[in-house]
Image: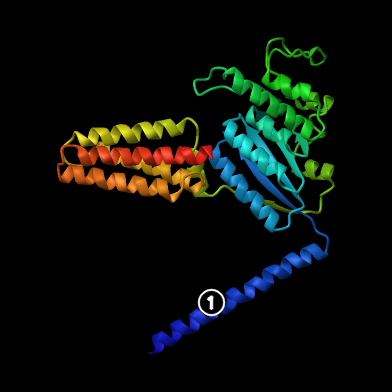
Amino acid sequence: MATRRWRLFFSFTFVILALLLIPLQTMVHSEREASGEELIYYIPVEQTVERGLEAFMARSFANAIEEGASHIILEMDTPGGAVDAAGNIALLIQETDIPVITYVKNKAISAGAYIALNTDEIVMAPGATMGSAAVIDGAGNAAEEKTQSYWLSEMRSAAELNGRDPQYALAMADNRIDLPELNAPEGELLTLTAQQAMQVGYAEAIASNRGELLEYLELENAVEIEMQVSFSEQIARFVTHPVVIPILLSIGSLGLVLELYSPGFGVPGIMGISALLLFFFGHMFAGFAGWESMILFVVGFLLIIVEIFVPGFGIFGLLGIGAIIGGCFSHLFRRLQ
């Protein structure tokens, strides 16, 4: 009886504290807003640009808007990445009313340069570079003419969005454009240094650190919040990497096919299931695969298990592999939408 009373007491106390924290949090925000204190959100844009980064940035922007941030600063160091992810990130920036500033800490190459051009201001660290934004296919070759034309128009639009001369953005994506005033090597894609970016109006300032950046923005007394990539988001970023996706799908499909022709359930099946679970988990967490994909995967897995333990002349196994492949296609269809 006494134990039950203590449980009720602690439960009641927990509920009361939770209710008290809500107005307390609101009061803290209200005090900050009343005092005129500005809030800055730092969002890291690092490593390869892929769908996992897109999901992380969407969460970060949502947090910044909810908390009433006055500025969002993208701390950038990326060699580029997927065109579709870069396009969605650019749309996220364009639809945000909060001023967005890119701080290029080291590199803003390819998709990174495109994302930076969509922001309101660009500040670069000494020695940082930005450019070299040609679009290539999965084999590393120049993309087809239709894709190139689309990408050039996107680079032009991104530059014009904030009043920047588009010829330099086009030169980043097309090596046929000659810019003698920058002494750029002929036949190479344009990559701007911090000083060159200042010269052509592609950077508003050069700052060695956050202190100098905030001094330029006149935000020395602002409250600073730094977004962190969660463990789950790190996994999602890894499995949505353009190089990792085909590897996981290959291991998954080969493992399941080998398992069908092996007695019992062994290493190939474990490897196949693990690879596909990683694939589906990463894409579900990033928001690019729905429950229909996971349901098809589970159904396919169960059918393969039935084939292993209840021989059905391969029918259950084929249906299982078909369901799993259907889950993959369902995911790809969701991405195209």
Residue 297, position as x, y percentages in the image: 35, 45
Residue 248, position as x, y percentages in the image: 39, 35
Q: Image check: 242 left or right of 148?
A: left
Q: Residue at x 66, y 43 (%)?
A: 92
> Which of the 4 image quadrants contains residue 221?
bottom right
Q: Amino acid at mark 1?
A: Phe
State how many labels appear.
Answer: 1
Residue 107, position as x, y percentages in the image: 66, 30
Residue 133 can be seen, yes or no: no
Q: Residue at x 31, y 48 (%)?
A: 299
Report helix, strand or loop for mark 1: helix
> Which of the 4 image quadrants contains residue 158?
top right
Q: Which residue is mark 1?
A: 14
Viewer-closest of 13 and 313? 313
Residue 15 can be seen, yes or no: yes
Residue 142 higher or lower than 195, as above or below: above
Q: Image check: 132 left or right of 200?
A: left
Q: Residue at x 30, y 31 (%)?
A: 254
Residue 114 higher or lower than 235, as above or below: above
Residue 152, position as x, y percentages in the image: 68, 23
Q: Residue at x 60, y 18 (%)?
A: 145
Q: Image check: 128 left or right of 46?
A: right
Q: Residue furthest bottom?
A: 1
Quadrant location, the N terminus: bottom left
Residue 10 higher or lower than 326, as above or below: below
Query: Mark 1 packing: few (<14 Cα in 10 Å), some, or many (20+)?
Result: few
Q: Image check: 43 left or right of 205?
A: left
Q: Residue furthest top?
A: 186
